[in-house]
Amino acid sequence: MDAERDDIVVLVDENGEEVEFEHIDTVEMNGNEYVVLIPFSEDEDDDLEEEVVILRVEHSEDGDDTFVTIEDDDELEEVFSEFQSRLEEEFEDEED
């Protein structure tokens, strides 16, 4: 990566490997904060279907943020629906 980007998040997978994700959005709802990420690829022509990853942000008392997997399917679907609505609104605004 040539230029430093502040929208890149590095997570560690179950095998201890670092994986880069691009931060797409932050959604606040029901008193929680969620991040919407997609796997980062420097190849803009990459044909792979983009997988959206949604994680809940938990804030510790010492100021550190931890991303937590959402186990509740209803919670995950609710956040994804909100993200889709925001995305649609953004594209509608750009078309005007």
Image (cartoon, helix red, strand yellow):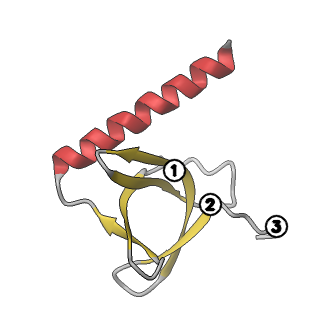
Q: Secondary structure at mark 1?
A: loop
Residue found 17% across the figure and 44% down from its top: 74
Kindly identify which numbered label has been placed on residue 3. 3
- From the image, tell me which residue sits under label 2: 41
State the image coordinates of residue 37 (x, y, percent, origin top left).
49, 55
Q: Are marks 1 and 2 in contact (CB under 8 Å)?
A: yes
SS at badge 3: loop
Percent coordinates x, y for residue 25 in the rendering: 52, 47
Foreground residue among 41 and 85: 85
* Residue occupying image coordinates x 66% and y 16%: 95
Q: Which quadrant of the view contains residue 83? A: top left
Sequence-earlier tag: 1 or 3? 3
Front of the two marks 2 and 3: 3
Residue lying furthest top in this view?
96
Label 1, label 3: how far apart the Cα atoms are: 23 Å
Image: 60 above or below 46: below
With 35 as the anchor, is 46 left or right in this view? right
Dot 2 and dot 3 residues touching (CB under 8 Å): no
Q: Nearer the viewer, mark 1 or mark 2?
A: 2
Q: Earlier in the sequence, mark 1 or mark 2?
A: 2
Quarter of the image containing the C terminus? top right
Q: Foreground mark, 1 or 3?
A: 3
Q: Quadrant of the N terminus?
A: bottom right
Hey, what amino acid is under mark 3? Ala
Q: SS of the residue at dot 2?
A: loop
Q: Amino acid at mark 1?
A: Leu
